[in-house]
Image: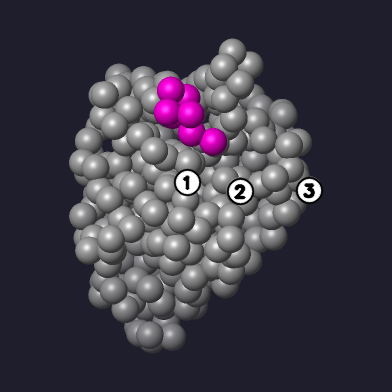
């Protein structure tokens, strides 16, 4: 569990949308450990009930099963809430290419519903999951918050529109928001199954079954893989910061380094081989590049360090080692 003072959120009521998902359920667990009262809103389209099992009976935890595309549900969820951590969205670039309409409905209309509901409930601050996909075709590395390119997928468009709406709500209604541009988050509770599974849990499960994972392209595409504990830290800092200059901003939520896919598979084989030596012999295969994928992703985290006091606790190797251990213990 991450190190954070309870004082600022003890007894506060915090709504986590998408709270049954990978990041959302980790947030719920962390907030409850810090003595906050947590409301989880989820429609279980991509989240899982088993992610909530450990705290379902906690008197400080409330589950509202509902959809952010319904404004009345959003208003009900925001009643009496101090802070909103908005994680609910349909992720995945390929999913958005296959079904741009649903991605738009959830990620834009649902987001707007939540902004309106939180504003009307006089929520103190609205922290939301933005995305590194917003950088689009910008080739500059590392990625700096105020320099973006054109989006490369419907998903990227929706996440950029979120930032535009958040900015307008501050200017038009004086409603405070902070956006966190997540960079390839991984770690415990991330779902390895399904057509749109993220690369790390998917590869981990394949290695554990002695199956060959398939890298899209030649493996030189790189990402700023970010362990879940770094993301939890950023959400807590964004929610509780007293620095007026830090509010109504967007921040890269990353480590500030990059790892290519060949290196990633080498790390995974190394750490998984500590549990099963045969995994070291599993071959890695290559397939075609995926449409909508950006070649490289590497974040500058200087803004978050300066304004929020962010200090990433896990680099790629430390994070992968912990994640592999969790998957081995829980999903083998």
Name the foreground residue: 143 vs 248: 248
| Residue count near mark 1 (Cα–Cα under 10 Å), binned few <14, some 14–19, many ≥20 | some
Nearer-N-terminus badge (2/3): 2
**Rendering quarter of residue 112:** top left
Marker disc for residue 161: none
Which residue is painted at 42% across and 48% down in the image? Answer: 13
- Circle 3 — which element? helix
Residue 323 in view of the camera: yes
Where residue 36 appears, as percent x and y from the top left, is 44, 57
User: Which residue does the image show at 66% across and 47% down from the upper left?
Assistant: 241
272 versus 88 height, above or below: below
Residue at point 54%, 36% (across, down) = 124
Residue sitting nearer the eye, 1 or 107: 1
Q: Which residue is mark 1?
A: 217
Query: In the shown orientation, is residue 196 left or right of residue 152?
Result: left
Tell me the crowding category of disc 2: few under 14, some 14 to 19, or many 20 or more residues within 10 angstroms, Cα based: some
**Relative to 282, residue 167 above or below:** above
SS at mark 2 in the image: helix
Residue nearest the viewer, comparing 261 with 153: 153
Q: Which quarter of the rendered picture does the C terminus lie within?
A: bottom left
Find the magenta span and give its range: 118-124
Mark 1: secondary structure: loop
Q: Which residue in the protein does label 3 denote?
A: 306
Q: CA distance from mark 1 to mark 2?
A: 41 Å
Task: Name the mark nearer the viewer: 1 or 2.
Answer: 2
Q: Earlier in the sequence, mark 1 or mark 2?
A: 1
Q: Label 3 crowding class (10 Å Cα cut-off): few <14, some 14-19, many 20+? A: few
| Quarter where residue 206 is shown | bottom left
Mark drawn on residue 240: 2
């Amino acid at each position: 569990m991450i190190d954070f003072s309870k004082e600022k959120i003890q007894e506060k009521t915090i709504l986590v949308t998408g709270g049954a998902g990978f990041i959302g359920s980790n947030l719920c667990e962390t907030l409850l450990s810090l003595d906050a009262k947590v409301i989880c809103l989820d429609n279980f389209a991509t989240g899982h009930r088993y992610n909530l099992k450990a705290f379902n009976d906690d008197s400080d935890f409330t589950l509202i099963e509902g959809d952010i595309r319904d404004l009345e549900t959003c208003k009900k969820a925001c009643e009496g809430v101090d802070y909103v951590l908005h994680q609910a969205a349909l992720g995945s670039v390929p999913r958005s290419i296959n079904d741009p309409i649903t991605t738009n409905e959830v990620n834009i209309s649902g987001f707007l519903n939540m902004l309106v509901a939180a504003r009307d409930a006089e929520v103190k601050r609205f922290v939301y999951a933005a995305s590194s996909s917003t950088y689009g075709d910008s080739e500059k590395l590392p990625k700096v918050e105020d320099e973006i390119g054109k989006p490369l997928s419907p998903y990227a468009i929706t996440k950029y529109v979120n930032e535009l709406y958040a900015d307008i709500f501050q200017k038009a209604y004086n409603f405070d928001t902070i956006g966190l541009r997540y960079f390839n988050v991984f770690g415990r509770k991330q779902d390895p199954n399904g057509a749109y599974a993220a690369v790390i849990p998917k590869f981990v499960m394949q290695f554990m079954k002695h199956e060959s994972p398939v890298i899209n392209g030649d493996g030189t595409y790189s990402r700023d893989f970010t362990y879940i504990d770094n993301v939890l830290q950023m959400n807590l800092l964004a929610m509780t910061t007293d620095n007026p200059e830090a509010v109504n901003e967007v921040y890269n939520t990353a480590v500030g380094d990059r790892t290519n896919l060949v290196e990633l598979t080498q790390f995974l084989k190394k750490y998984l081989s500590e549990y099963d030596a045969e995994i070291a012999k599993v071959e890695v295969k290559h397939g075609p590049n995926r449409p909508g994928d950006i070649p490289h992703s590497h974040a500058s985290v200087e803004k978050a360090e300066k304004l929020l006091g962010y200090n990433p606790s896990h680099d790629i190797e430390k994070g992968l080692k912990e994640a592999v251990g969790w998957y081995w213990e829980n999903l083998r």
